[in-house]
Image: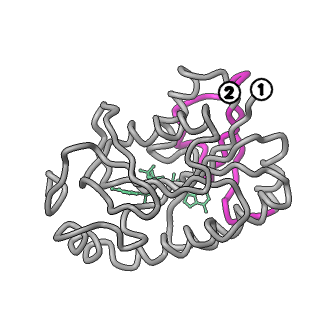
């Protein structure tokens, strides 16, 4: 049985993905997070909860025991340190497959006025996420980096995908769409291997996300 380790499991996309995993697959989930009280999902025969920090390599190495695939839904100023910790722990544990949530703009791939606006508003956040993605891309892991457009909480799954060297498309995408991409990629782990995919809602091109 496939066992998925979810890092940052209390995050907003992660919690949607957890529901989708339980509904759409028979995979077992190990939820790894700093604040288990943030979870609405409860422990069960398919769900195990482990309290831990992604930058803590010892704790992470223990959590990787018996795991087939890691889905990292992390954030924060130390995201590069977390990426290093994940890569090193996965290398030591022999777990190869990683799905890593990043952000749009890390390769300066967002075109036009929206690209300029995105760079201005996100500033050093992009630099930090780019450094973390570089750590993943320089590893030997079978990674998929996901670069979502600006996130909405819309209850919809509607997305298109661009690849590592493509120009980014659109301005927005729902968290539910990203969660679905994560679950689909876990179900078919030969997809998007060593790729970095942009994910956006079709026909949302513009100078800013629609709510700005
Ligand atoms: N907002 C946007 O429009 C947008 C667009 C593109 C990409 N993104 C990025 O997409 C990612 C996922 O989005 P989201 O909405 O699911 O974000 P989120 O709800 O903020 O989830 C990120 C999770 O990371 C956890 N985390 C941070 N540092 C950690 C550590 N050292 N160890 C373990 N867990 C840690 C946080 O948990 P704690 O409760 O412990 O803090 C949080 O639950 C984020 O990185 C976000 O920046 C956002």
Q: Secondary structure at mark 1?
A: loop
Residue at the (72%, 63%) spot, across then down: 87
Residue at the (78%, 41%) spot, across then down: 67
Q: Position of residue 122 (x, y in %)?
A: 32, 72
Q: Residues within 10 Å of mark 2 (few under 14, many from 20)?
A: some
**Segment colored magenta:** 29-57
Residue at the (19%, 55%) spot, across then down: 209
Q: Nearer the viewer, residue 85 or 138?
A: 138
Q: Position of residue 46 (x, y in %)?
A: 70, 25
Residue that carries the numbered disc 2 in the rendered image: 27
As for residue 85 lying within the magenta part, the answer is no
Q: Position of residue 7 (x, y in %)?
A: 63, 50
Is 19 drawn above or below residue 86 in the view shown?
above
Q: CA distance from mark 1 to mark 2?
A: 6 Å
As for residue 45 lying within the magenta part, the answer is yes
Is 106 drawn above or below residue 176 in the view shown?
below
Residue at the (68%, 27%) spot, across then down: 27
Asked if ligand 1 lies within 8 A of label 2, the reply is no
Mark carried by residue 1 = 1
């Amino acid at each position: 049985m496939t066992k998925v380790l979810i890092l940052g499991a209390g995050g907003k996309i992660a919690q949607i993905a957890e529901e989708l995993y339980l509904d759409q697959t028979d995979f077992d989930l190990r939820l790894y997070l700093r604040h288990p009280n943030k979870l609405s999902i409860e422990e069960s025969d398919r769900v195990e909860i482990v309290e831990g920090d992604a930058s803590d390599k010892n704790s992470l190495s223990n959590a990787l025991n018996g795991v087939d695939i890691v889905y990292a839904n992390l954030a924060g100023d130390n995201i590069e340190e977390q990426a290093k910790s994940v890569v090193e722990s996965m290398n030591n544990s022999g777990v190869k497959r990683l799905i890593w949530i990043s952000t749009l703009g890390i390769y300066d791939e967002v075109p036009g006025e929206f690209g300029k606006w995105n760079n201005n508003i996100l500033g050093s956040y992009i630099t930090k996420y780019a450094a973390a993605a570089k750590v993943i891309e320089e590893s030997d892991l079978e990674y998929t980096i996901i670069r979502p457009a600006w996130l909405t909480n819309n209850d919809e799954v509607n997305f298109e995908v661009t690849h590592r060297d493509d120009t980014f498309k659109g301005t927005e995408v729902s968290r539910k769409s990203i969660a679905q991409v994560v679950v689909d990629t876990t179900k078919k782990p030969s997809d998007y291997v060593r790729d970095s995919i942009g994910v956006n809602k079709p026909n949302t091109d513009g100078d800013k996300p629609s709510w700005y």
